[in-house]
Image (tube, grey):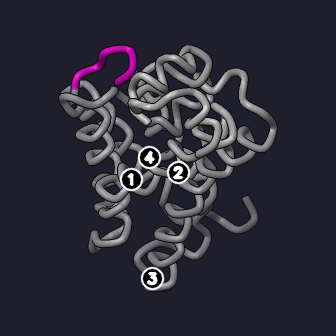
Amino acid sequence: MELFWDRGYHAVSMSDLTEAMGINSPSLYAAFGSKEGLYREAVGHFAETESDDILAPLRNAPTAQEAIEGYLMASARTFTRPGRPPGCMVVLSAVNAVGVGEETSRILREMRAGSVAVIEERLQRAVDTGELPASLDRRGVASYYVTVQQGMSIQARDGASRAMLETIVHGAMAAWEGLTQPRNAAA
């Protein structure tokens, strides 16, 4: 997982994979069918093991605003952890998964779109409780904050510090009021 996360799909060779796993090529093929099969398993493992800290604020924060800010701050923390590749493997796969087949590309697109859906659900809960207006463009707001988070992943890959990513979070949260104010239905 970390090889693919750090270097991307295309830049990792079969010999890199077999060396890292301590197995030979026939064993890798027997277990995963192909390099791409192993990549899909690695992406699945990443999603299972690396996303809880980032998504927890969306489940647990008392307000939608705190949930979004917590999600972005957790992303800043996670994307810059020492001893781990910077950024998000799934986000970076948009540019680092060159050479994968259509099925794997579809899975990766769906995973990235899933982030929008999770935030949209949190915003819907806020609408349902009256915290946010019914006219809220939930998809637009969710897409905005996911775009910020994905940009943070790329910034982390390019060497941005946690402090720099947190500055980006503060800027993104400054847009909250404008994004969530009641809208005229006729507009």
Q: Name the residue under label 2.
A: 44
Q: Which residue is drawn at 38% across and 14% down?
A: 158
What amino acid is found at the position of numbered circle 1 in the picture?
A: Ser
Q: Distance between the residues labelled 1 and 4?
A: 8 Å
Q: How crowded is mark 1: few (under 14 residues within 10 Å), some or many (20 or more)?
A: some
Q: Name the foreground residue: 21 vs 123.
A: 21
Q: Which structural element holds mark 4?
A: helix
Q: Are marks 4 and 2 in contact (CB under 8 Å)?
A: yes
- Asked if residue 35 can be seen in this view, the reply is yes
Q: Name the residue under label 4.
A: 46
**Which numbered tag is attached to residue 130?**
3
**Which numbered tag is attached to residue 51?**
1
Q: Is the magenta stretch mostly helix, strand or loop?
A: loop
Q: Are marks 1 and 4 in contact (CB under 8 Å)?
A: yes
**What percent of the width, then of the height, locates residue 66?**
29, 61
Q: Tell me: residue 20, above or below residue 143.
A: above
Q: Give the range drawn in magenta.
A: 156-161
Q: Which structural element holds mark 2?
A: helix
**Which numbered tag is attached to residue 68?**
none
Q: Earlier in the sequence, mark 2 or mark 3?
A: 2
**What percent of the width, then of the height, locates residue 177?**
40, 54
- Asked if residue 152 can be seen in this view, the reply is no
Q: Which structural element holds mark 1?
A: loop
In this view, the mark in front (2 or 3): 2
